[in-house]
Image (cartoon, rainbow, N blue to C red):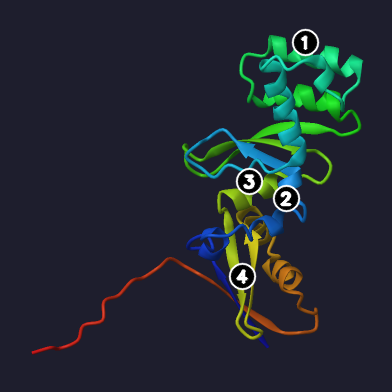
């Protein structure tokens, strides 16, 4: 018999404390798949090599770097890029960057999206490689819309999104979801507990 506890009271602090381990739940190549930027109050992620290359090219055109220094693009690309940058209003705007990306990476497909949390101030802009991206999953983990699932018997912990848990509860399939995320065989018995609010009590000690 395995005992499983699903904590829905708050997002797992260990995903957002001081590391980026939450990225592993979204994509094995997260930093090359997603660029997140826009709301400066929240964490921005701009590590992707393709994003850096695009913004460097835009910067070079804005700085009027001589044509002969653009050795890694064709003349046709140069003319198209110059036209794009000349017309752009904001050099770091995702719409401008994506136009540049489509010229320098014609074999790739890029997209843009806005992800949102549960409160009005929780939003971010996302620029991403379409191949391998899951925007709904990114949104859930970036804004902490997830729940900790703790296998008390095996002392193991994993995470499920709010949407996955809600759908499983609605369809009476929480057991199937738990077996899937915790890798529990169908023939092994489980009992599942879900948090129901949070009660904080004070322990009073007589001192006189």
Mark 4 in CB contact with mark 1 (< 8 angstroms) = no
Q: CA separation, marks 3 and 4?
A: 19 Å
Q: Earlier in the sequence, mark 2 or mark 4?
A: 2
Residue 192 placed where, x, y %?
61, 76
Q: Nearer the viewer, residue 63 or 192?
A: 63
Question: Which residue has dot 1 on it?
Answer: 83
Asked if residue 96 shows in the view, the reply is no
- Badge 2 local density, few (<14 within 10 Å), some, or many (20+)? many
| Residue 190 in sight here | yes
Mark 2 or mark 3, earlier in chain: 2
Looking at the rendered structure, the secondary structure element under dot 1 is helix
Q: Is residue 117 left or right of residue 175?
A: left
Q: Are marks 3 and 4 in contact (CB under 8 Å)?
A: no
The residue where tag 3 is placed is: 139
Instruction: Look at discs 1 and 2 and give the one toward the viewer.
Output: 1
Depth check, mark 2 against mark 4: the one in front is 2
Instruction: Give the CA separation, mark 1 to mark 2.
Output: 31 Å
- Please give the name of the residue rendered at 76% of the width and 44% of the height, measured from the top-left corner: 33
Q: Mark 2 points at which residue?
A: 30
- Marks 3 and 1, Cα distance to the nearest angstrom? 34 Å
Q: Quadrant of residue 52?
A: top right
Q: Which residue is drawn at 74% across and 73% down?
A: 179
Q: Which residue, given by chain and number where applicable, does mark 4 sit on?
A: 149
| Element on which disc 3 rests | helix
- Tag 2, which secondary structure? helix
- Mark 3 vs mark 4: in front: 3
Q: Do the residues labelled 1 and 2 touch (CB within 8 Å)?
A: no
């Amino acid at each position: 018999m395995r005992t499983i506890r699903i904590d829905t009271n708050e997002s797992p602090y260990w995903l957002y404390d001081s590391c980026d381990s939450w990225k592993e739940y979204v994509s094995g190549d997260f930093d090359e798949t997603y660029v997140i930027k826009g709301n400066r109050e929240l964490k921005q992620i701009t590590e992707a090599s393709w994003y850096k290359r695009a913004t460097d090219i835009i910067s070079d055109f804005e700085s009027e770097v001589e044509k002969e220094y653009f050795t890694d693009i064709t003349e046709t690309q140069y003319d198209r890029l110059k036209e794009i940058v000349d017309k752009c209003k904001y050099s770091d705007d995702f719409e401008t960057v994506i136009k540049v990306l489509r010229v320098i990476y014609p074999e790739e497909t890029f997209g843009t999206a806005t992800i949102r949390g549960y409160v009005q101030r929780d939003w971010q802009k996302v620029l991403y490689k379409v191949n391998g991206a899951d925007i709904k999953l990114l949104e859930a983990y970036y804004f902490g819309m997830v729940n900790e699932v703790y296998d008390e018997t095996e002392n193991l912990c994993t995470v499920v999104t709010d949407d996955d848990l809600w759908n499983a509860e609605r369809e009476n399939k929480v057991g199937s979801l738990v077996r899937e995320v915790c890798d529990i065989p169908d023939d092994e018995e489980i009992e599942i507990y879900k948090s129901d609010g949070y009660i904080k009590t004070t322990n009073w000690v007589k001192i006189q």
